[in-house]
Image (cartoon, helix red, strand yellow):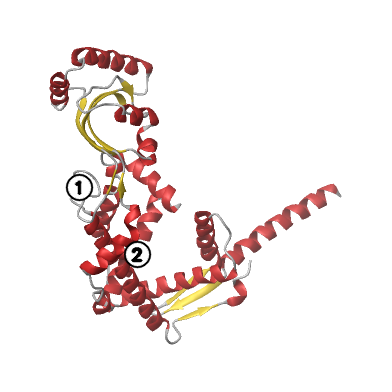
Amino acid sequence: MKKRIAIFVLVSSVFVSHAFAQAGLQPAAVVNLIRSEPITVGQLRTEVERMERALGQPLNGQQRREVLDAMINERLVLQAAERDRVTITENELNQHMNQLRAQMVPMLGRQPTDAEFATAVRNETGLEMPAFREQTRRQLIQQRYLFSQKQELLESARPPTEVEIASMFELTRSQFVRPETVRISMVQVPFGPDAASRGRARQQVDNLAREIGSSTARFNEVVTRAQAPNSGLQGGDFGFIPRNLEAVQRLGQDFVNTAFGLRPGEISRVMEGPPGSGYQIIQVTELHMMRSLELDDALQPGSPITVRTYIANVMMRERQMSVFAQAANALHTSLRAGRTFQVFEANLNW
């Protein structure tokens, strides 16, 4: 009897698993512009769950339907692009990916490694790199097709006038306060993950600290020496550091406290950098006190971007996004006309 019950439970489990699998293969919708292309319930659920993780809350029925509508629109545009031979080459995709990687350079101070870029993508989108590349490719095709169909509308966004920029500045003036900022020159002795490497690096940086003492001239000599090939050192201008939370998160509280505790020209004590970096000695080369900015002030010391330019760029980007949304809605409406897709309402409840 017990054996029969066990067999029944096993068969029931297999039946339930099979039923769930079959439910996932049922169509939530079918797109049919140039060919029949189903959007399965499983695909819809995967996208809904990804968005729920990103938002940190479940989607209701109306929001799930909006996700499905977006998936339908995407497939309609991709089929239309295929019909009209609008494509993105592998080289164009690689160029776009490199542009995304370059956005990490200001934060890291160098080009990210493949692993660092993949981790950032995963944290930001929840996607592994192959899936992210495919998603990016599809997005680029859609953008190119949209521009090919709605170019006149997309180009209709006009730049803001000087009066509009000045008016926006007065409304947002309180946001344009530049924090206290220092410019840093650094010498760093890198070390590996093992204790022996750390010990050798510590001995080397202590010798450098004694050599430099409090002399700006000797510090600059070591910086120059560090830039020679195979010097075993790293050195040079570290750039501007604002006194804010982001700098603390990126560089550590000890580094920020030390940097802002120095007078221009003063040499720091030896510090240990973030994991994987090394031992550091820094010198403050410029000090800029906190101040409220005017329209023609640079957003950051040494930056060519003024408050005026920044406001103009933000206003223009907002106008372009508004026009882009209008163009996309017009394209989706035209592609949805006729019998180009079908939604299976009975399969949307789970």
x and y percentages locating residue 133 in the rendered image: 35, 56
- Give 216 or 79, whichever is nearer the viewer: 216
For disc 1, the neighbor class at 10 Å (few under 14, some 14 to 19, many from 20) is few
- Give 155 or 67, whichever is nearer the viewer: 155
**Image: 241 above or below 261:** below
x and y percentages locating residue 17 in the rendered image: 65, 58
| Mark 2 secondary-structure assignment | helix
* Disc 2: which residue: 139
Residue 326 seen from this side: yes
Rendering quarter of residue 56: bottom right
Name the kind of residue labelled 2 in the image.
Gln
Q: How many numbered circles does the render carry?
A: 2
Q: Residue at 26% across / 53% down in the picture?
A: 99
Q: Residue at 38% across / 17% down in the picture?
A: 195
x and y percentages locating residue 127 in the rendered image: 43, 52
Q: Nearer the viewer, mark 2 or mark 1?
A: 1
| Mark 1 secondary-structure assignment | loop
* Disc 1: which residue: 303
Rendering quarter of residue 31: bottom left
Q: Residue at 34% across / 29% down in the picture?
A: 255
